[in-house]
Image (spheres, rainbow, N blue to C red):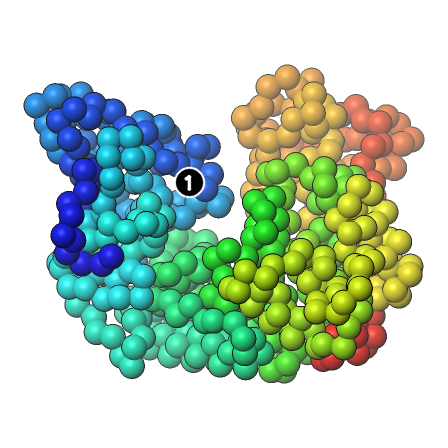
Amino acid sequence: MLAQQSHAADVTVHLKLISPQKLEVSYQLPKTCDAIPFLNEETLPKFGSEIRAAWQAVDDCGTADGTTLIKTNKACSNIRFNVPATSKFYDRVSPGSFPMGEGMYVHTTSYAVSDKCGSVGYQFSAPGSIAFKGQLFQENASYEAEGGNYMAVLLLQKQIASKSGTISYFNPALGAENIQLLQNMADQAVDFYNRALPDVAFRKPILAATMARDGGTPNFWGDAGDVLRLALYNWPEHPTPDSDARLRKFVWHEFAHRFQAPTAKESEPRAAFIGEGGAEYLRWTASLKTKWSSPENAATELSTAISNCISRAAGYSWKTLPKNLVNSGSVPYECGLALHVMGLAVRQNDASSLQQINNYYHGFETGEVTSFEQALECGKKKDCTPQWLPKLMGEQPMSTAWSDFFVSTQLAKPAPPPPAQYANIQRMAFASLMEEDCNGSASFYTDKDAFLVGEIKGCRVFKEGMKIQKMEGKNLFSSSLVADEMIQACTSQGKVSLGLQSGETLFVPCKGKFKIPQFYAVDMKRLMQKLDL
């Protein structure tokens, strides 16, 4: 239910925009309610304490920590906090107070509490417009139906209007050219996916885009909830071919999510790769179908995704991958893309690859859900058993499973690591060296041309704050693959030399355990034939 309600909730969570940089959250509790747990959806159990540590109590009525809202003054019925706007990234957490220029994107998951003290309702206030769940309000709105604990809301200082049923907000700081480009890309993505997935419902989002500058390189961050948030950092005011290509990938990926039913998960361990991998597959396929990416570029991208997926698995099988790898970082995107593309390339029926995905997603809407493996390899074909995806996602180490797959299908062949992957391989090699020295732990950051050792204990050689610039006398990020030098030194001498920024040289004992991962190059001509591209 939207807007005013006939039955007041027992607990009210009120999010009020004070300024583009400050939000007030207040909790109105029954007199008998002295403490109430936060629901902590997503990965908030890990980050909740840090996020709520930034909340500032407005009065002396209560406290909020990682797990619980506590009333400290029984005379209070309302507990209020000021919440600063922040663009800090927490993996797999929807931002609770993200600055949007003339307002704020908020997600109720950061504020949601349990029903321990009764039913919970949500209220929203802003000087201008409020938008959520496809609807637009002015100044005040409320929501008490199911799902209020997990929804995105746009709070603005100014009022905006819906145009032809579409609710959009663009921070003027983006500039006219970027705003027009974003709008065009969004329209083109929706048009393509509507035609490619005719039986799948498009969940029309509220589009909200902003620009921020933090002194770094151009990058972006977004999510595809009911408020589809696009945040561009340090983006050029006037688009270039390179910025166009990167932005198109970003926008088309996020809009692909809006053609995935919220239930398109099967089970929680599969949610990330089905969601992110599916969006990557649609975006990658669209890039070829619309010819804004050449087959050569698409081949490079897919080859890199496959190779990174295998290397990051580090000897695990799909079934034994640690949860943090399955659900975070690049693994859901890269492994997900590889599994979608290759699973569809070996499908056993006559449907096109996009029709197969159309039917799979439509099944989530109708309740006729089959497994990912069955849907991609067999689709609606009767008496069909998937051959390869169960093996790629089975008990064998992923390096073995993928090698067997490519030997049999000839869809890719082993290839030397491309120079674009040297830096990534160097990080993997350094992590392996540190783990050997630090009892299985590693903590370091890339700082321009060096590795900076982070907070870590139990090491024999490495110490926090060390800045390593060289390995075996060569710059870490040179034009050659320096990890080869490390492997040779460990094998022949049992130690590797590291050059510090201070000029000092360290010798780190090692056994040569690290192996440069096998890379693959896809046979794009064969693959495009298999995928009807």
Q: Nearer the viewer, residue 21 or 184?
A: 184
Lateral position of residue 352 relative to residue 239, left or right: right
Q: Quadrant of the N terminus?
A: bottom left
Residue under the point 65% across and 58% down: 370
Lateral position of residue 168 relative to residue 521, left or right: left
| Rendered view: 280 above or below 443 | below
Could you classify mark 1 by the number of other residues whose Cα lies within 10 Å: few (under 14), some (14-19), or many (20 or more)? some
Residue under the point 76% across and 39% down: 316
Lateral position of residue 170 relative to residue 468, left or right: left
On the image, the x and y values in percent for residue 394 come to 77, 45
| Rendered view: 472 above or below 108 | above
Q: Quadrant of the C terminus?
A: bottom right
| Secondary structure beneath label 1 | loop
Report whether residue 331 is seen. yes
The single residue placed furthest to the front in the displayed view is: 383
Q: Nearer the viewer, residue 91 or 391?
A: 391
Residue under the point 13% across and 59% down: 139
Q: Nearer the viewer, residue 483 or 392?
A: 392
On the image, the x and y values in percent for residue 154 come to 27, 58
| Rendered view: 436 above or below 449 | above
On the image, the x and y values in percent for residue 525 come to 81, 77
Residue under the point 65% across and 74% down: 354
In the rendered picture of this protein, how many numbered marks are placed on residues? 1
Q: Nearer the viewer, residue 56 or 271?
A: 271
On the image, the x and y values in percent for residue 281 come to 63, 66
Q: Please identify the quarter of the rendering in which residue 461 is found.
A: top right
Amino acid type at circle 1 is Glu
Report whether residue 297 is seen. no
Where does label 1 land, which residue?
41
